[in-house]
Amino acid sequence: MIRTIAITHAHEVKVGIALKDIHMNDYAWIWTDFNCPTPDEAELLDTYFHFHPLAIEDCMVVLQRPKLDFYDELQFLVLHALNPDTLNVEEVDLFLDHNLLVSFHHKQLTEIDEAWEQIIQHANDRKIWSRGPVACAYTLIDKMVDLYFPALYSIEDELAEIENIGSDESVEELMKQVFDLRGRLLKLRRTIVPMRDLMYRIINSQHIKNSGEHTVYFADIYDHLIKLTDMIEADREMTADMRDSYISLNSNRMNAIMKTLTVITTVFMPLTLIAGVYGMNFDNMPELHWQYGYAFILLGMFLLGGGMVIWFIRRGWFK
């Protein structure tokens, strides 16, 4: 589906104009959104807008890394929108000119729809829309970055929950949750860091027309991405500390178990020796015919085992 918003020179907003009916000289600037386009609609990037073939190829091949390319008077941006629930990334491509903004995405995106509605609702705000498609591009990017926060806040809530109930669950279950959170944080980092670098390029770019007026707005998005990056690094450090703590705890528990088993084995070694000697049943063993031999041997084994346990306790082996 292709939809279009056109801003007249009188700063009026017109929605739903067909591409064939648009004459650029009649409008201050336009925004055309390729929303889940069909192959025939995607061809209009070449046949109608005459964009650079390399930029069109990047639109067809997903997922590209967020980037900013320059083609004469045209700027081509690759952006990443994020699903807060699944953390899956959807590519959004923007073609930006002094009087034109074209967005291209293969799936329906809430961020695009919200920006679309915001432009329509603020149709009379000439102070914003008189600045051209750069203001519209800023709105789109800002909506995308805003949806990064819920995904990270959800992970932080899970981290806090693990800290609160950590002692009530097994180490294996806690380790599983921690490694799952670390994987999701890494997935977020792979999305947010390239977007942060892209915003830095936009802020320092001299190629985007009228971008100087919006530098403060793009800088605000850049600050949000820096904050997100810092939060991710802090959460990764926290999960690393939790992982190391659980590994140490598990090692200590294993050492205590092995120490206990070692003590038990050591106590039974001499008792097993005695039982083995008197279990050979040789005829010339005089002790086999003692009247109180059985009781004497059991008493000796009990005293020997008990003495070893007392000695281990005094040595501090059970601490």
Image (spheres, rainbow, N blue to C red):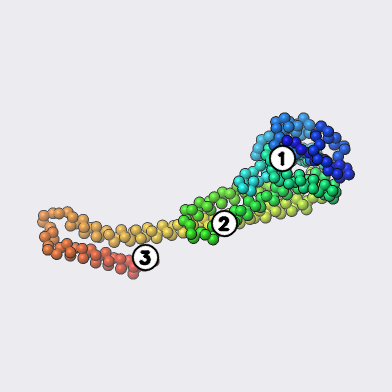
| Local secondary structure at mark 3 | loop
Which callout, 1 or 2, points at the residue further toward the start of the chain? 1
Task: Name the quarter where the N terminus is drawn.
Answer: top right
How dense is the environment of label 2, judged by Cα within 10 Å: few (below 14), some, or many (20 and up)?
Answer: some
Nearer to the camera, 173 or 59: 173
Mark 1 vs mark 2, foreground winner is 2
Nearer to the camera, 168 or 210: 168
Q: Disc 3 designates what residue?
A: 318
Residue 21, given in percent of the width and then of the height, sits at: 83, 33
Q: Disc 2 designates what residue?
A: 159
| 243, above or below 56, in the image | below
Residue 84, given in percent of the width and then of the height, sits at: 63, 48
Q: Disc 1 designates what residue?
A: 93
Quadrant for residue 318, please give it.
bottom left
Mark 1 and mark 2: Cα distance apart in space: 34 Å
| Local secondary structure at mark 2 | helix
Residue 319, given in percent of the width and then of the height, sits at: 39, 66
How dense is the environment of label 1, judged by Cα within 10 Å: few (below 14), some, or many (20 and up)?
Answer: many
The residue type indicated by label 3 comes to Phe
Mark 2 and mark 3: Cα distance apart in space: 35 Å
The residue type indicated by label 2 comes to Leu
Q: Which mark is residue 217?
A: none
Which callout, 1 or 3, points at the residue further toward the start of the chain? 1
Can residue 5 be seen? yes
Mark 1 and mark 3: Cα distance apart in space: 66 Å
The residue type indicated by label 1 comes to Asp
Kindly check if marks 1 and 3 are in contact, taking CB atoms under 8 A apart as contact.
no
Instruction: Tell me the residue at 67%/55% (across/down).
Output: 227
